[in-house]
Structure formats: C-alpha cells, structure tokens
Amino acid sequence: MKVLVVIVFYNNRAEVERFIHDTAVDSTESIDVAVVVNSDKNLQVDLMVRALIESNLDNVHVFDFGANVGYLNALLEVIDRVNILF
C-alpha cells in the first residue's frame, strides 16, 4: 500500500525541498509526495522540478494549477489525478 502526502508550495521552496528529501528519498516504495503550487512569486518551481528530476525522485509529483485554487479543491484534484497515474 502506498501513502500519498500532499503538501502546498506557497513561496516556500526551501521548506518544500527539505520535506521532500526528509520524506520521499528514503520511502520511494511506500510514499508518494504531491506538491500543489498555490503561489510562486519568486519563480522557484521550475528550479525545484529540475532538481527533483536530477535526483531521480519518481515518487514526487508537482501540480501547478496556475493560480491559488484553494486547499480543498487542490487536494481533491490531486487525489483524482494521482489515482489516474497508478
């Protein structure tokens, strides 16, 4: 069984990356991490995605809806999309 952890990126790249590396790196078999981008004023998401690709973390999924869609709406949409991936 896999666990899906959904976290919010709200202009907090360092915090999100720290969480991903503390959680996802050691748990690629049992934990998937979904990052929902609600705000990226400093344009850091692309840099974070490149770093994730270089780290070969295939259990991390980034969802950028282009606007702050709200926590509940984002959570429900991510659950739906991640279920499609599996």
Image (cartoon, grey):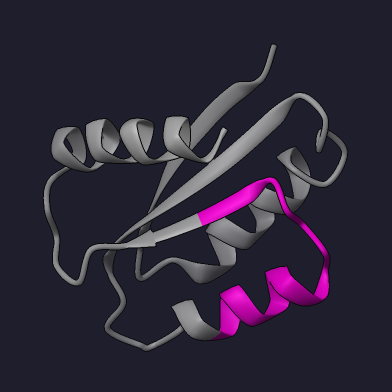
Percent position of residue 82, x then y: 45, 37
Please indicate whether residue 73 sits to the left or right of residue 4 in the image. Answer: left
From the viewer's perspective, is residue 83 above or below residue 63?
above
Toward the top, the furthest residue is: 1
Q: Quadrant of residue 17?
A: bottom right
Residue range of the region highlighted in magenta in the rendering: 47-61
At horizontal 49% and vertical 45% (from top left) the residue drawn is 34
Percent position of residue 53, x then y: 72, 72
Percent position of residue 35, x then y: 46, 52
At horizontal 55% and vertical 58% (from top left) the residue drawn is 15
Asked if the magenta segment contains residue 54, the reply would be yes
Name the foreground residue: 86 vs 30.
86
Percent position of residue 2, x then y: 66, 19
Q: For the N terminus, give its image quadrant.
A: top right
Q: Quadrant of residue 42?
A: bottom left
At horizontal 50% and vertical 83% (from top left) the residue drawn is 46
